[in-house]
Image: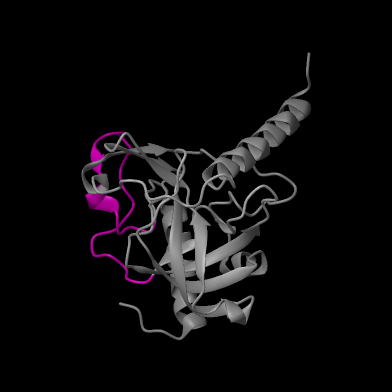
Amino acid sequence: MMKPEMKRKYYYILWALLLALSVYLCIDKKSKLETLDYSNIDSAAVYVLENWGGDAINVDTPWRFNPLISFDELKKYSDLIVRVKAISSRGKNNCTITETEILDVYQGEKNMFNNIVYVYEWGELYFQHTYFARDGYTLMTPQQEYVLFLNKFYNPYSEEEAWLLANVFHGKIITNWPEGWSVIDDLKSGTLIYSEVSDWGLITTDEMVFNCYKDIYENVLSLTGTEYE
């Protein structure tokens, strides 16, 4: 019988391969970034996939799926920290890649200012009426601004450059704290409509995760020197 440690090791390897494959499919070199129809996303039913990253914390990126990462850790493990405006272009192949314009660079290559970068997001819309929020993730809204903590994704098979969020819970920080956003009592899939949560930083039942996001948000205010609402 296989030891639990070996099973966990193989699970990590499988997860890393699946993540790499999904990103590759989103940006394969045979076709440029295409626009998917997200026009109905506001009316989509939200299905929250808790612990989707779960135990998939491998030795190379232990910070990516940590729901209680600190602001200092997030900075340490980010290749690029930027303020961006989301653009309405989306990816393909059942993945979401959001096109963004860099407005400010706080850490990383300063010459990235005004560049267009593509960010792999952790949620996706299926069949125009169902939104899968992996680990409670909400997509960037077109024309809205965000502060992103990013890792470069080196894909030798693609002509498109893509970036991964350094942390799937707290790597995308909203710049306007929405009124009424709080921890929810439960995650009954299909009972939430996307328009109800689209401006939230994330969807969670865990007060510790929510407070971690709030702490990073407040640190972002100091980092950027901006009085966000």
Q: Residue at x 67, y 32 (%)?
A: 14
From what the image shows, is residue 126 above or below residue 156?
above
Q: Residue at x 31, y 46 (%)?
A: 37
Among the 4 quarters of the image, the one containing residue 2 = top right
Q: Does the magenta segment cover residue 116?
A: no
Looking at this view, name the residue that lies furthest to the bottom: 225
Among the 4 quarters of the image, the one containing residue 25 = top right
Report the front residue among 21 and 32.
Answer: 32
Q: Is residue 165 visible?
A: no
From what the image shows, is residue 11 above or below residue 113?
above
Residue 141 located left or right of residue 152: left
Looking at this view, name the residue that lies furthest to the front: 30
Q: Look at the image and tell me in which quarter the N terminus lies.
A: top right
Residue 193 located left or right of residue 12: left
From what the image shows, is residue 5 above or below residue 123?
above
Q: Is residue 26 visible?
A: yes
Q: Does the magenta segment cover residue 176?
A: yes
Give the main secondary structure of the magenta stretch. Answer: loop
Q: Residue at x 38, y 58 (%)?
A: 140
From what the image shows, is residue 99 above or below residue 4?
below
Indicate the colouring scheme: one colour
Q: Look at the image and tell me in which quarter the C terminus lies.
A: bottom left
Query: Magenta stretch?
Result: 175-201
Position of residue 225 measured from the top left corner of the image (x, y, whole percent):
46, 86
Report the front residue among 219 and 199.
Answer: 199
Position of residue 146 measured from the top left corner of the image (x, y, whole percent):
41, 68
